[in-house]
Amino acid sequence: MAKSIIDLKALTIELAHAALVRGDFTAAELAQAYLDEIAEKNKDINAYLEVFDDVLEQATKAQSLVKPENMLAGIPIAIKDNILIKGRRVGSASKILEGYVAPYDATAIKKLRDAGVVFLGRVNMDEFAMGGSTENSAYGVTRNPHDVSRVAGGSSGGSAAAVSMNGALAALGSDTGGSVRQPASYCGVVGFKPTYGSISRHGLMAMGSSLDVIGTITKTVRDSRILFDAMKGKDSFDSTSIDIPAVNSQKKPIIGVPRSFLTGDGIDPAVIKSFDESLKRLAGLGYEIKDIELPNIKYSLAVYYVIMPAEVSTNLSRFDGVKFGAKVEGKDLLEDYLLTRASGFGREARRRIMLGTYVLSSGYYDAYYNKANSVRELIKNDFVKAFELVDVIVTPTAPSPAFRVGEKVSDPVAMYLEDIFTVPANLVGIPALSVPAGSVEIDGKNLPIGVQFSAKQGAEDLLLGVTEVFLGEIK
Amino acid sequence: MITKQDIEKLAELARLKLTEAEAEKMQTDIGSILLYVDQLKEVHETTATTIVGSNRNVMREDIPQNAGGSYTRALVDSAPAHDGDFVKVKKIL
């Protein structure tokens, strides 16, 4: 009965909150509507790895928190499988964490729990957030709700697909090189990666510690803002976390476009067309648009594929069959390590561990790791200079719409190139988000295309404001 | 060019047992990724500041944040092999 009265497709956090406050439906009815939708759609999409068994209990408990000032009370959301919820299975979609149960809540989870959020379940991802298609999950690929022969993107593919198929009002993901924004672009939803450190990483499984940040997948920018406001802030458990000061500027932001970065031959013509239309829309909304130069941005992906695997090989060294998850017995401790890690990690995880071990090894450290850090500084300096001239930088989110399942699995470099526009924001630590900007029809299916907006560190308010205007959410 | 011996050495350092076929595929894949990242060699504009970088360590006092023993059970239970409050491992020496 709940399903007949609640139109999940049109629902946002804001609208659901208003309806809960009015009493149009209860938190339990809302949660049941999502459970029904997941039961119907997840078998084809594979967004959820697990739907929690206490969803209705959580919802009933949250009902008492439903008040006009509690925006998130009773709001059902999905959580990426690398964010810890106390007492729940969590595994970064890796066999090496088979059987692992989280001993504590991530700080972001604790804040959402206190706000009355209902956690629907844990959603699929590339193993340890490494990949752009969820094809690296040990539990099968997540398919794109717009065309099930195509990927949902990654690594937060389960998060984006869950929201896109109306299987959650919103989802948490993590973004190390575009893992929230790229799947959002492929699935036609909003993917927001905030400033590095603005949301605590405590309880987020580490991949690239100088790059990782928790992000949100939502249907509107206003919903992203609501979740961000609930999770942000300095946390004593994460020494890299920071407070984002409130900045109130009345000046109309200036938009920058790094033209020379957008002329590569790997960019799909439909993406270019959609991007040009977005610029026209911005101009029509009265924004001044300027061309900018970011001379070293072309090296971003090369820098990323040194620094990220270096951090991955370090962070993933803790998975050895001694402390958590699965274990394969060998004849001695060394063989326990070798066998556990060989069978527990998937192909991409092993590839990046090996690559990271290489760039950090004696004799290659200077040529690769130090060099990459040095070029990272140059890229940061380019952005600092650009943000003296403009307030927001616009690029496509990904060079193509969603690709087919299996299309890129055999060529790691082709897969990595999907991150070309998203990686710079992680290297520089700035906030960036992808919002739907149109679609292209391929084989009778409408495939979404996103556009990416970024701003300087801590300029979330301005960034979200511009995109709210761009999408017509506010005037 | 990364050699087969390099791959074997790296697998040993990374504590990964690779089959012959996996080692061969790894050699091709890592070779193509290194070829891609080699474009960093074009960049010569690296100064003392960029080498040292702008990030700094943030230190704090090492003071326990939780009551002693409050997570012991959950953490020990996470280990594949344990006995009482101890994590079990094979003899090293």
Image: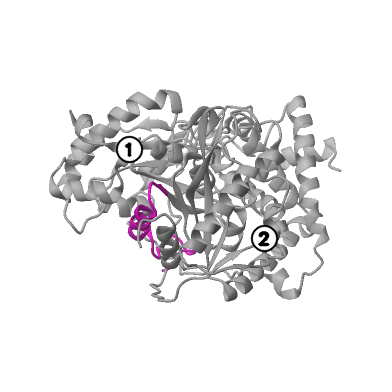
Residue B30 sits above or below residue A203 on the image: above
Horizontally, residue B53 falls left or right of residue A86, namely right
Q: How is the image coloured?
A: one colour
Q: Quadrant of the N terminus of chain A?
A: top left
Q: Secondary structure at mark 1?
A: helix
Residue A293 in sight: yes
Give the residue pinned by disc 1.
Answer: A9
Rounded to the nearest angstrom, the CA distance separating label 1 from label 2 is 36 Å
Residue A259: which disc?
2
- Comparing A251 with A207, the one in front is A251
Could you tell me the amino acid type at mark 1? Lys
Q: Secondary structure at mark 2?
A: helix
Q: Chain of mark 1?
A: A
Is residue A78 shown in magenta? no
The location of residue B40, given as percent across then percent down, is 78, 57
* Chain part drawn in magenta: A217-243
Mark 1 / mark 2, whichever is N-terminal: 1
The location of residue A149, given as percent across then percent down, is 54, 26
Residue A110: which disc?
none
- Comparing A456 with A139, the one in front is A456
Q: Quadrant of the C terminus of chain A?
A: bottom left
Q: Residue at x 44, y 31 (%)?
A: A99
Could you tell me the amino acid type at mark 2? Arg
